[in-house]
Amino acid sequence: MIGFYVVFIGIILFVAYAGIENTIKLFTYIDLEFRYRWILLRSYSLRHKLEQQLGIVPTSLLEHVFPEGYKND
């Protein structure tokens, strides 16, 4: 129950700081980002299978789902 209040107060504070329009834009961006990552996750098996058939070194799951932020150090 405390988690609900923390989230609710956080949303109220964000609306007070950034306004309703920007809050809606933020939630829209988060929704689109989740949908995009879900599509990448589902397409990983197809890409992995195709890379094996073509003889290319397969990419890792993290590199496929997060291509711009993945570092292989």
Image: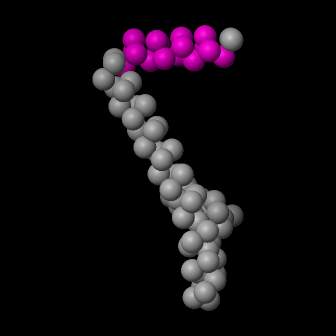
- In the displayed structure, would residue 63 be above or below residue 49? above
Quarter containing the C terminus? bottom right
Task: Count every numbered label the image shows and give the total.
Answer: 0
Q: Position of residue 30 (x, y in %)?
A: 46, 37
Query: Residue at (64%, 63%) from the top-left corner?
Result: 61
The quarter of the image holding the N terminus is top right
Q: Which quadrant holds residue 14?
A: top left
Q: Is residue 43 above or below residue 49?
A: above
What percent of the width, then of the height, locates residue 13?
Answer: 47, 12
Q: Quick check: can you spot residue 57?
A: yes
**As rendered, which of 21 and 44 lies closer to the eye?**
44
Residue 4, given in percent of the width and then of the height, sits at 62, 15
Against 27, residue 41 (above or below) is below
- Main SS, magenta region, reads helix
Q: Which of the 4 image quarters holds residue 48?
A: bottom right
- Residue 57 % position (x, y): 64, 81
* Left or right, residue 22 beside residue 5: left
Does residue 71 show up? no
In this picture, residue 58 sits left or right of residue 11: right
| Residue 60, quarter of picture | bottom right
Segment tinted magenta in the rendering: 3-18
The color scheme shown is one colour
Query: From this viewpoint, which residue is outermost toward the left?
Result: 21
Q: Is residue 67 above or below residue 35?
A: below
Residue under the image location 54 percent in, 13 percent down = 8
User: Can residue 10 be found in the magenta stretch?
Assistant: yes
Q: Is residue 23 magenta?
A: no
Q: Residue at x 45, y 38 (%)?
A: 31
In this picture, residue 42 sits left or right of residue 72: left
